[in-house]
Amino acid sequence: MNKFFAGLVYCLLYVVSLLPLGVHYFFSNILAFILKRIVRYRYSVITVNISRSFPEMKYGEVKKLVSDYYKYMCDLLFESIWDLSHSADAVRKRVTVSKTEVVDDLLKKYGRVILVMGHCGNWEMVSGMMITEKDRTPDSYSSNQVYMVYKAAESKLSDILFKKLRMHEYHKFHTKGEVVESKQVLRHALKNKDTRAIYIMIADQNPIGKHDPIVDFLNQKTYMLPGPDFLASRLKMPAVYLRMDRLSRGRYHIDYEKISEPSENRGENYVTKEFARLLEEDIRRNPVNWLWSHKRWKRNIEPEQ
């Protein structure tokens, strides 16, 4: 039954996606107004997150950033719907990519690479990082397996739908791969240790473990997910930061920056700390380009005695 309803929702979204992008942005503007002015969706969460992250901002600057964020957040939703029915070539016109050699060289050297990213740009359109089939080479990461690591939704219906939506984006580029639940990623990587692949991990969610690494992030002590560091050290895999920047409405750019290689002894939690540093740099450079409505700091961190 869940599969039936997930399929039904998918079909409805697909029909809506056929509308021109300009129409999607028209509805995005309306939704942004409703969420901010009428529903007040997570208004206090967004405002507090921004204020604490940028204590140097004046009241007017915070207010403007909050307003811009609602527009950006709604754009993400409607762009993701639009993306459903549009071709790989159409997506690549909106998502450009550079520095692919960073990933290709590490993949050639080690066979597998971890790509670590935050909730920046439009992560639901990150499939735009793929080189279209006619332009790629056999050594390109786009010619190998792509595993998207995700956290399973509590609702079975939502989980089925999210998996279908996310892998649809990669399949339109004729890329091999699948989604992998975060709790199963180590087992999956061990089972497929001889498969050339990249693992994409969105690593700025709020973790729930008692011993998660803590970093200084946006002027606050912050828990971080240990997964990328654990996977990189346990399986001797290189880690790369995937940067997705919003250039303008509906236009994004992706590039890559190496974090570490297995041969480098960088110390405990190095991948996590470096990821946090790079992500903070990107957020400070383009503050609206991050998921401010997420309850990122809902867990208090007790000061050391």
Image (cartoon, rainbow, N blue to C red):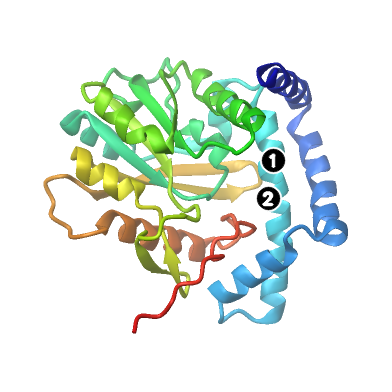
Q: Residue at x 78, y 44 (%)?
A: 28
195 to the left or right of 150: left
Q: Where in the figure is residue 157, as x and y percent of width and height?
A: 66, 28
Is 62 above or below relative to 86? below
Q: CA distance from mark 1 to mark 2?
A: 7 Å
User: Toward the viewer: 175 or 131?
Assistant: 175
Disc 2 marks which amino acid?
A: Met
Q: Are marks 1 and 2 in contact (CB under 8 Å)?
A: yes
Q: Where in the figure is residue 97, as x and y percent of width and height?
A: 44, 37
Picture disc at residue 77: 1
247 to the left or right of 249: left
Circle 2 residue: 73
Say whether residue 286 is visible.
yes
Give the residue furthest to the bottom. 305
User: Toward the viewer: 106 or 90?
Assistant: 106
**Which quarter of the figure is the C terminus placed in?**
bottom left
194 to the left or right of 172: left
Few, some or many C-alpha atoms within 10 Å of disc 2 (few <14, some 14-19, many ≥20)?
Answer: many
Q: Residue at x 41, y 41 (%)?
A: 201
Disc 1 marks which amino acid?
A: Leu
Say whether residue 257 is visible.
no
Q: Residue at x 37, y 66 (%)?
A: 214
Q: Quadrant of residue 66?
A: bottom right
Is 30 above or below relative to 110? below
